[in-house]
Amino acid sequence: MKAKGLDDASDFDRDRVANAIDKAETLVGQLMDQARGIGDREREGRVERLATAARAVFRAVEEDPRDLPRARKFMGVYLTGARDATAKFADIYSRSRDLQARTDFVALLDDLESSFNAHRESLLIEDRTDLDIEIEVLRDRLKHEGVRPRMEE
């Protein structure tokens, strides 16, 4: 993480993030293992897209360890649920090719992927909000010290 400019993150924070991401990657691996049991390449590919969305959240947390508390639900609870649902779907679909189960499963994956993508965007927006607040605070301090802001041209 030092290579990513996170020198100011404590070793404790870096270790917590690395540990959480390792656990989440294990869940993604288990999710993908379950998806291979579906026996339908299109549905397996759909699960891979969900895994990609999940990993985008992991990358956002790596870039800013302060995001870990907000991302834990996505990195644990949601991935565990996706893994378990995939295992159940693979079992049912491999035996019966139940079209309603397939429709419901794909809808679940769509919802989860949308949720992961929205959460990742939220983490990025929050970073921008933090920057905006910091700029505003600094401008107020400068104004208080008598420094006039440069007029925009």
Image (cartoon, helix red, strand yellow):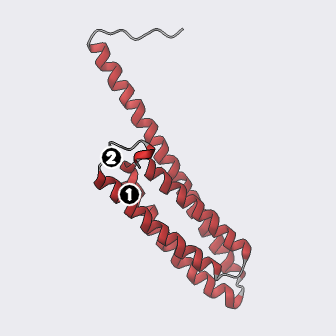
- Using the image, determine if residue 138 lies above or below residue 97: above
Can residue 76 be seen? Answer: no
Amino acid type of the residue tagged 1 in the rendering: Val
Q: Label 1, secondary structure: give it.
A: helix
Q: Left or right: where does residue 146 sit relative to residue 131?
A: left
Residue in front for this viewpoint, 6 or 58: 6
- Using the image, determine if residue 78 lies above or below residue 70: below
**Image quarter (top left, top right, bottom left or bottom right) of the C terminus:** top right
Q: In which quarter of the image is residue 95?
A: bottom right
Q: Residue 17: which disc?
A: 1
Query: Circle 1: is it few (<14), some (14-19), or many (20+) Cα within 10 Å?
Result: many
Seen as rendered, the residue at the extreme bottom is 95
Q: Where is residue 33 in the image (x, y as percent from the top left)?
A: 58, 78
Seen as rendered, the residue at the extreme left is 145
Q: Where is residue 60 in the image (x, y as percent from the top left)?
A: 48, 50
Can residue 63 be seen? Answer: yes
Residue in front for this viewpoint, 78 or 21: 21
- Using the image, determine if residue 150 lies above or below residue 83: above
The residue that mark 2 highlights is 9
* Residues at marks 2 and 1 touching, judged by CB atoms closer than 8 Å: yes
Question: What separation in Å lies between label 2 and label 1 (alpha carbons)?
Answer: 10 Å
Which of marks 1 and 2 precedes in the sequence? 2
Q: Which residue is drawn at 68% across and 77% down?
A: 102
Amino acid type of the residue tagged 2 in the rendering: Ala
